[in-house]
Image (spheres, rainbow, N blue to C red):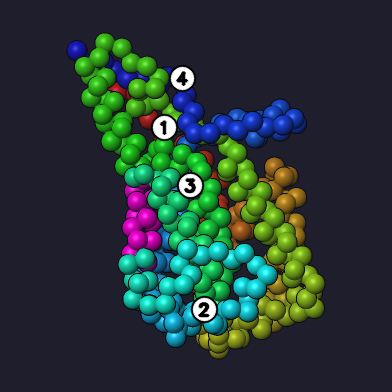
Amino acid sequence: MILKCRMNEPMVVGLTPWLPWPLSRWAWWTEPVRAERLAALRIGLALVLLVDVVVQYLPHYADYFGVGSLGSPEVFAGRNSGHWHWSLLRGLEDSRLFGPILLLWAAAAVLLLVGWHSRLAALVAWVLSVSILNLNYGLHNSGDRIRSIVLFYLMLTPCGAVWSLHSFLRGRALGLRGQKSSSLTPDSCPLTPTFVSPWALRLLFIQMALIYFFNGVYKIVGPDWRSGEVLFSILGNVQWARWSFADLPVPFVVTKLLTWGILAWELGFPVLVIVKPLRTLTLLLGVVLHLGLAFTLDLGLFSFYMLCMYLPLIPWERWTKPKDQ
């Protein structure tokens, strides 16, 4: 007898932490969210990480790591004093050892991408991310720190609950079991919507708001940002710009307005996203900003790592509603 599996009670997976008052009374912190949002974060971050390792690290690992390289221990010895910049790779001198290490990093990204042992893969990727970052500061930028932050959240959360190889195989097994069973429970129904506690996504969103705000605070201290000249100078700098300013000339007044606009947007971000009528526009401006930076400036994968933080804000569940069989 083949039974039809219908939508049932929602299933919440993962850790649901205790929250003090008033957070425990605030639905934004307590109401579970669809697991697709966390899965989108996992997939996006894993894809960017995989490109990062394969394209930017592996081809040049002998130049970046090991004795005699740009990231040799003596180059950054002075910067380590007084700081606990830990790295499991510190002390490795043979650059040839970093080839297999980077392949392990890429393998962790692949497992995270397909969603097989996702939390373990995120843990391995996080350890390697921090270790490699702390070996060669000059090689990295703020985007690489965002990479480590997101991986940290992923290893603590059930990021492979949906849209993963694990969930696919589990759902298939449960579906076959359901065909042979006379009853189905919410936990055994592959069509049951899966939810996660929102704490990790909320903390990540707050962290994103603080990143923008304090970045704006740092910028407004500098006279070049206040005068509006920064963007014009950067677009004309061959070390930063992807295109010659002669090929893409932008009027000075436009770059000045854009400079001030970026500064105002960053400083106002925490407030703008609280105001519901302005929230969507504020986030769209952030997406446009990072796409523009990726197109015009040589910042590595910084913009794409930042865009990963926007993925959980998209209501993916609207397009993934399962249908009754």
Inter-mark Cα distance, 4 to 1: 14 Å
Percent position (x, y) of residue 228? 75, 76
Identify residue for label 3.
155
| Image quadrant occupied by the N terminus | top left
Query: From the viewer's perspective, is the residue at label 2 or at label 3 nearer?
Result: 2
**Which mark is first along the chain, 3 or 2?**
2
> Could you tell me which residue is drawn at 54 percent across and 82 percent down?
74
**Residue 82 vertical position relative to residue 276 in the rendered view, above or below:** below
Left or right of 66? Residue 190 is left
**Residue at disc 4, secondary structure:** loop
Distance, label 2 to label 3, CA atoms, is 29 Å
Residue beneath disc 4:
9
Crowding at dot 3, Cα within 10 Å, few <14 / some 14-19 / many 20+, comes out as some
Which residue is drawn at the image coordinates 57% and 79% (left, top)?
76
Q: What segment carries the magenta color?
A: 102-115
Q: Which callout, 4 or 3, points to the residue nearer the camera?
A: 3
Residue at the disc numbered 1: 321
Q: Amino acid at mark 2?
A: Pro
Classify mark 2: helix, strand or loop. Answer: helix
